[in-house]
Amino acid sequence: QVQFVESGGGLVQPGGSLRLSCAASGSPLSIYVMGWHRQAPGKQRDLVAEISSDGSPNYSDSVKGRFTISRDNARNMVYLQMNTLKPEDTAVYYCNGWHLRKGSRYDYWGQGTQVTVSS
């Protein structure tokens, strides 16, 4: 079974940048659609960005133009470059991978990494 481990979170000032990394193990990354989700205190977990196995990205409107998702299947890594960070970006960020098998969707999650945007 695949496992995901996030890293790169931390405290950053508004307007700053962070790069999150997600390392996959136990299964080839190439079979998964990969995404980053975030959850702020008291709120639901929302999709931030997603990238298909062939590298096509999609972004939520709230991060479009500021965040960039990328993947390196050879290294089993997924990244989220976050620029021009805002206080409202503060959340726990989760790496997610999913694939279809016999018509059913299977989701796998990392443990999350905290991102705090504050002066």
Image (cartoon, rainbow, N blue to C red):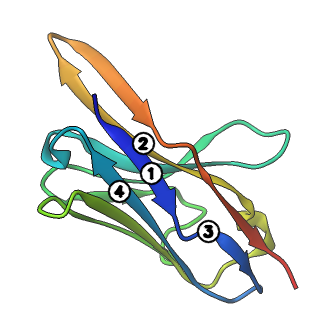
Q: Which residue is mark 3?
A: 9
Q: Which residue is mark 1?
A: 5
Q: Where is residue 20 drawn, in percent x and y?
A: 49, 68
* Contact check, label 4 and label 1, Cβ < 8 Å: yes
Q: CA distance from mark 2 to mark 4?
A: 11 Å
**Could you tell which of marks 2 and 1 lies nearer the N-terminus?**
1
Q: CA distance from mark 3 to mark 2?
A: 16 Å
Q: Which residue is mark 4?
A: 23
Q: Quadrant of residue 72?
A: bottom left
Q: CA distance from mark 3 to mark 4?
A: 14 Å
**Disc 3 crowd, CA 10 A, few/some/many (<14, 14-19, 20+):** some
**Could you tell which of marks 3 and 2 lies nearer the N-terminus?**
3
Q: Which residue is mark 2?
A: 96
Q: Secondary structure at mark 3?
A: loop
- Residue at left 40%, top 49%? 35
Q: Where is residue 85 drawn, in percent x and y?
A: 66, 79
Q: Quadrant of residue 43?
A: top right
Give amino acid for label 1. Val
Q: CA distance from mark 3 to mark 1?
A: 12 Å
Give amino acid for label 4. Ala
